[in-house]
Amino acid sequence: MGMFTLTASAETSGYYDYTVLNGEATITHCDTAISGNVTIPSTLDGYPVTSIAGWAFYNCTGLTSVTIPDSVTSIGGCAFYCCSKIRKITL
């Protein structure tokens, strides 16, 4: 049985906390101060954003709409839980 090592790093850029694995970024948390119409970036510090983790935007009550870029291919469960003012999500 072979051994392997996965390496991920945790970073912050603006409102977003994210991890990088295999050169791709996953948004893991968003500052709850974010508000209004938000476009999630397609890259963070040069890494393509390919996923949004479950609970990442939990309790971001000021969000009213979210645009998710084509680079995102995975959205975890409850990613936008308790974001009660969201009226529109554009994929």
Image (cartoon, grey):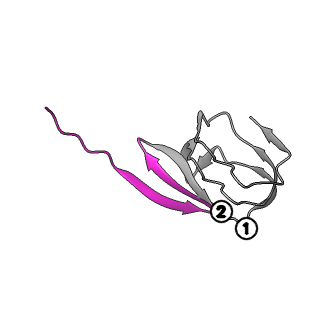
- Tell me where the magenta segment starts and ends, as one range: 1-22
Confirm or deny contact between disc 2 and disc 1 (CB under 8 A): yes
Residue drawn 41% across and 41% down? 22
Q: Residue furthest left?
A: 1
> Is 27 situated above or below 76?
below
Tell me the kind of residue under disc 2: Tyr
Which label number is shown at residue 15?
2
Q: Is residue 15 left or right of residue 67?
A: left
Whether the magenta-drawn stretch holds residue 11 is answered as: yes
Quarter of the figure that contains the N terminus: top left
Q: Residue furthest bottom?
A: 33
Considering depth in this image, is 14 or 85 the residue closer to the camera? Answer: 85
The CA distance from mark 2 to mark 1 is 8 Å
Report helix, strand or loop for mark 2.
Answer: loop
- Please tell me in which quadrant of the rendered image residue 51 appears: top right
Residue drawn 18% across and 39% down? 3
Mark 1 Cα within 10 Å, few/some/many (few <14, many 20+)?
Answer: few
Residue at the spot of label 1: 33
- Mark 2 or mark 1: name the one nearer the start of the chain: 2
Considering depth in this image, is 46 or 2 the residue closer to the camera? Answer: 2
Quarter of the figure that contains the C terminus: top right
Q: Is residue 77 left or right of residue 87?
A: left
Residue 75 picture location, percent across and down: 60, 39
Tell me the kind of residue under disc 1: Ala
Q: Is residue 77 left or right of residue 24?
A: right
Residue drawn 58% across and 51% down? 44
- Please tell me in which quadrant of the rendered image residue 62 appears: bottom right
